[in-house]
Amino acid sequence: MGYKIVNTMLINSILPYVNLVSGFMVPWITRSMDNSFSGDQYKTKTTSIAKYKKIYSGGEYVIHFKYSGLLNIVFITMMYGVGMPLLFPIAAFNFFNQWITERYIVAYYMKLPPALDDKLTTNCLNKLKFAPLFLIFNGYWMLSNEQIFDGRWKFIEKASLGMLSTH
C-alpha cells in the first residue's frame, strides 16, 4: 500500500508540467488550424469576433482545482508521513513544481486572474488547520503499533458473543 501512495505522489509531482505542456499545445494547435498553419493571427477561418476571441484568448484560471490539489498533497503527507518519511520531500518537490508552473501559467497563458475575495483562501486555511492533527494522531498510532515494526501479526484466537456481554 505504501508503494502505491508514494508512486501516486510522485506522479502528482510531475503533473504540473504535463498540464503546462497540454495547456500550451492544445490552444497552439487550435490557432494553427484556424490560420491554416500560416502563423498570421489576422488570417482566420472564424466568422465572428466571439469565436475569434475564444480561440486566441487565454484560458480561465480555475483556482478551486489548485486548492483541492494542495489539500490532497498536504493531507496525504500528514496522514502517512510518519510511516513513510519519503512523502515529506516528495510533497516539497510537488509544491515547488506547482509554484513554478503556476507562475508561468498565470503570467503567460491565462486571461486576467479571477477577482476573488479572501473567502476561498480562508476556507482552505481553515481546513489546513486539521492537517497537524492527522500527523499527530496517525503518527502516534503508527509509532505505537508493534505490527508495523515487527512485520508480523496475530489472529484473534476466539471471537464470541460472550465477549460482548456485560457479565
Image (spheres, rainbow, N blue to C red):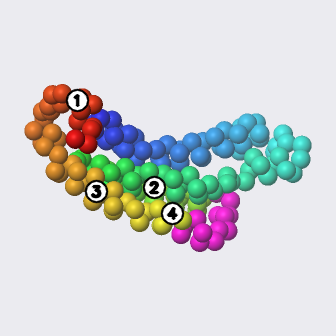
Q: Which residues are magenta?
A: 110-122
Spatial distance from mark 3 to mark 4, Cα to Cα? 21 Å
Return the residue found at the far bottom: 118
The earlier-in-sequence mark between 1 and 4 is 4
Q: Which mark is residue 137?
A: 3
Magenta stretch: dominant secondary structure: loop
Q: Indicate whether 144 appears above or below 114.
A: above
The amino acid type of the residue labelled 4 equals: Cys
The front one of 103 and 128 is: 128
Q: Is residue 23 visible?
A: yes
Q: Which mark is residue 71?
A: 2
The earlier-in-sequence mark between 3 and 1 is 3
Residue underneath mark 1: 159
Look at discs 2 and 1 and give the one toward the viewer.
1
Spatial distance from mark 2 to mark 1, Cα to Cα? 40 Å
Spatial distance from mark 4 to mark 2, Cα to Cα? 8 Å
| Residue 124 counted in the magenta span | no
Look at discs 3 and 4 and give the one toward the viewer.
3
State which quadrant residue 132 falls in: bottom left
Spatial distance from mark 1 to mark 4, Cα to Cα? 44 Å
Q: How busy is the neighbourhood of tag 4: few (under 14 within 10 Å), some, or many (20 plus)?
A: some
**Horizontal and vertical percent position of residue 121:** 54, 67
Q: Indicate whether 131 appears above or below 15.
A: below
Return the residue found at the far right: 47
Identity of the residue drawn at 83% across and 46% down:
51
Q: Secondary structure at mark 2?
A: helix
The amino acid type of the residue labelled 1 equals: Ala
Q: Is residue 88 visible?
A: no
The earlier-in-sequence mark between 2 and 3 is 2
Q: Which mark is residue 124?
A: 4
Q: Secondary structure at mark 3?
A: helix
Identity of the residue drawn at 63% across and 40% down:
26
